[in-house]
Image: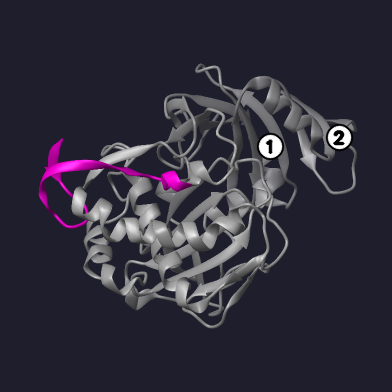
Amino acid sequence: MAGTCVFCGFIGKLTGEHVLGDWLSRIGLDLDPVAHLTGPLNRLGRGIGITPPFIRTVRDVCGPCNHGWMSQLEDVANRVLTPFILGQTGTLAQADQGAVATWLQKTALVAMLVSSEEERAGGYGLPPEEYRAVYDQRAAMEPLPASRVWLGRYGGERRFGSTGVTPLVVAVEGLPEPDRPQGYVMTVAVGELMVLGVRFTTPSLQVNITARDGFASVWPVTRDIAWPPGPAVDDAAFLRIAGGKDLHVAEPHLKLQPWKPATELHRSRLVGSMIELPTICGKHVVNYPAVLVEEAMCGRFYAFITSCECGAAYSIETEADGAHCKTAGDPAAITEQYEALNGVEYLIEDEGGSFWCKRLTETSGPDARGKMGS
């Protein structure tokens, strides 16, 4: 297929570049078909088929890039990361850490190409200049300037392979959030390995950051890394890390946080005694009692389940800054997750009708019940 290579700008025949290297299909991982999803972070994932893992490709890369420097990165990743992916102990030598960090960056950039141009528009994708910048310093086998990369252990249930990119902003205490992203967090989880990175696309805004305990710094290089570097993260922790919510900034007046237009729903609105909340399908709304907003302002948070006209069920939790969709999918599975939550269940009755929710607590059992007025 003829086109323009996103990395070097070559115009001509393009090849299929694997999102996750096809060498992963030859190291002993489970190859049963799985559902693949893509799309914006604040929407339900768009299904792109049920296929074996590690065969997804994009046709945006020329042959010289695909079979040259990109293949060299995959060769290094295969050699040094395979034991970690399979849960074997080992050491990541300093000499290979630059290539591993670059592999993460290249993989994140390629993964973004699975989404449509419309999905990547308006700041949700990565700047096109990132692709050219990676290409321009390909010979160095080092990630772009103003990048940090860490290695961790993954213990969740998505081990067929997951890649993600979340736009970030540097927020200054007391000032409005910037209207455009200033960086991004990138993650790759496959087998028992998780690679985490941050790249500041506005280098002058680079801040001193650290990852959570249990992650070892790969870039900048400081020492050989013994793997595993710490305890495994579960899926709940993985989602926080991949969402850019678990990075620590040294400067007390600064925060590095997700860019809300890409990660949050549109603002809710008050309709009578109910709050109208847009759903992550992007087409419908659901409603919950406004009294839960008052409760959140007092530091009391609740969980509830609901569904929209698409048929998907949602697990919603209130937090200090609003209501957030935690999971979405099959109603039976969402109900099971809700019932497993620790907390006292309340029935709210007002002009909007009857509404069940659960006050989140560490000490109450999931079957406790009460009644809340409004």
Q: Which residues are magenta?
A: 1-23
User: Left or right of 22: which side holds 232?
Assistant: right
Residue at the spot x=38%, y=63% of the render? 183
**Front residue of this view, candidates 257 and 79:** 79
Picture coordinates of residue 366, whole percent (x, y): 86, 35
Residue 100, by quadrant, is bottom left
Q: Position of residue 212 (x, y in %)?
A: 64, 67
Q: Quadrant of residue 306?
A: top right
Residue drawn 41% across the image and 40% down it: 40
Residue under the image location 28 percent in, 47 percent down: 122
Inspect the image, locate mark 1, and give the three-letter code of the amino acid beneath it.
Answer: Val
Image quadrant in which you'd find residue 89: bottom right
Label 2 residue SS: loop
Q: Is residue 252 above or below residue 277?
A: below
Residue 9 within the magenta-colored segment of the rendering = yes
Residue at 43% x, 59% y: name it. 104
Q: From the top left corner, tell me how far across and down residue 302 is, in percent.
A: 73, 40
**Amino acid under disc 2:** Pro
Question: Which quadrant of the figure contains the C terminus?
Answer: top right
Asked if residue 68 lies left or right of residue 191, the reply is left
Q: Position of residue 201 (x, y in %)?
A: 32, 66
Residue 291: give its label.
1
Label 2 sits on residue: 366
